[in-house]
Amino acid sequence: MTPHRSLLLLLFPFLLANCSTKPSPAAAAAEASRATPAPPLAVLRADSEPERAALDEAFLGVTTDGSVVPGLYTLQATGVSTAPLVEAVRTFRAALTDEQRAASSFPLEDEEWRRWTNIDINYYKRQGIGLNELSPAQRELGLNILRAGLSPQGFRKTEEIRKMEGYLGRLTGEFEVVGPDLYWFTFMGEPSETEPWGWQFDGHHLIINYFVVGDQVVMTPTFLGSEPNYIEDGDGAGTRTFAGEEELGVKLYRSLDKRQRAAATLHDRKEENYAQASAFRDNAVVPYAGVRVSTFTSAQRAILNELLGEYINNMDEGHARIKMAEVQQHLPDTWFAWVGDVEAIGPFYYRIQSPVILIEFDHQRPIFLEGDLPTRAHVHTLVRTPNGNDYGKDLLGQHLARHPH
């Protein structure tokens, strides 16, 4: 696909959106039982007016009605050491040149946190230091940050996505736009086992925001995706991305009884992109919709927990265990929503949403490959921490209130 066609596909929902007014949070809540297409992708370039407008909007966080539920997050010791991650970051930064270190260093509360995007670099120039700018030794030290901050499962998924980007480059010839090394590190604050800091890994189909305060971690927003989702030949042949997220989503939906499935199904056709809380949508209003988990049988909850693990267990084991416990506390207030045919044969979207987690899985329209309708060959997934704690902002606010800097 040419860059021009890619840009037209990105602009299409934005042009449509200009024909209507944005609904209020109250109106959105009233329409919770209906599926809505993805919000317009207004920010297409760095240092543009739409980007400036998005960044100037005061951070609130993803909510269900425009109001943050208070008291969900607490500064506390977890007993899970962040020392290996601190050491990995310090070692990597020590191996950089002065220029590379300066280019990838930002203040703790810099807006760089919110400048992540899935758009390829043909349109959006990244900050920081790219893997493609590093020596082989430096690159390996950079990947050690991912190994330290993620679980083996999570690191494997990042490697599979990078392989898929290389395959996409081979399929399209767009080697200057997509590839396994077109990912950038930025660091906010200084790595510490006591003071708050964080890092970001940003590129096409792979974005990780990782906030640390003491031994607490918040790893959202995290965006993982791929187009296509299977490597047929050459380097990485046989690699399949998002098999677990896809298969378990279908398994959970098919486990629902007739009444549950009717409640969960927001729309029985998947003809649009539906992800609601992607890049530059930090304050998205996403009303609860679908079927409530409090109606699930024990067998259905077991499937849901396995599906949650496909996302939460991408964190290192200790912090994933803590996050899963937090999610389990709010399981009765968790909702599961579905967009797609009721036989779960074609492309689909699902959402898992509670006061403390938002997960979206979306089969998207092709961008680089051929076709105009959503396809299972193009996957986007997103994890957020609703009610004000994406980028660890709630925890950071509590820390600064106790320890003014």
Image (tube, rainbow, N blue to C red):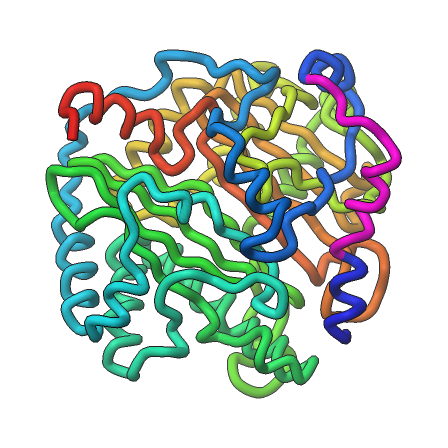
In this rendering, the answer to whether 358 lies above or below 248 is above
Q: Is residue 13 magenta?
A: yes
Q: Can you tell which quarter of the image residue 239 is in? A: bottom right
Q: Is residue 274 magenta?
A: no
The N terminus: image quadrant: bottom right
Q: Can you tell which quarter of the image residue 377 is in? A: bottom right
What's the magenta region?
Answer: 10-24
Tell me if residue 297 can be seen: no
Residue situated furthest bottom in the rendering: 234
In the rendered image, residue 64, in percent from the top left (x then y), is placed at: 59, 19
Q: Can you tell which quarter of the image residue 260 is in? A: top right
Q: Nearer the viewer, residue 42 or 263?
A: 42
In this rendering, the answer to whether 40 lies above or below 60 is below
In the rendered image, residue 289, in percent from the top left (x then y), is placed at: 68, 21
Number of numbered markers: 0
Q: Nearer the viewer, residue 13 or 342?
A: 13
In the rendered image, residue 155, in percent from the top left (x then y), is placed at: 37, 60
At 14% from the left and 24% from the top, the residue drawn is: 403
The C terminus: image quadrant: top left
Q: Nearer the viewer, residue 38 or 309?
A: 38
Tell me if residue 174 can be seen: yes
Q: Nearer the viewer, residue 255 or 369?
A: 369
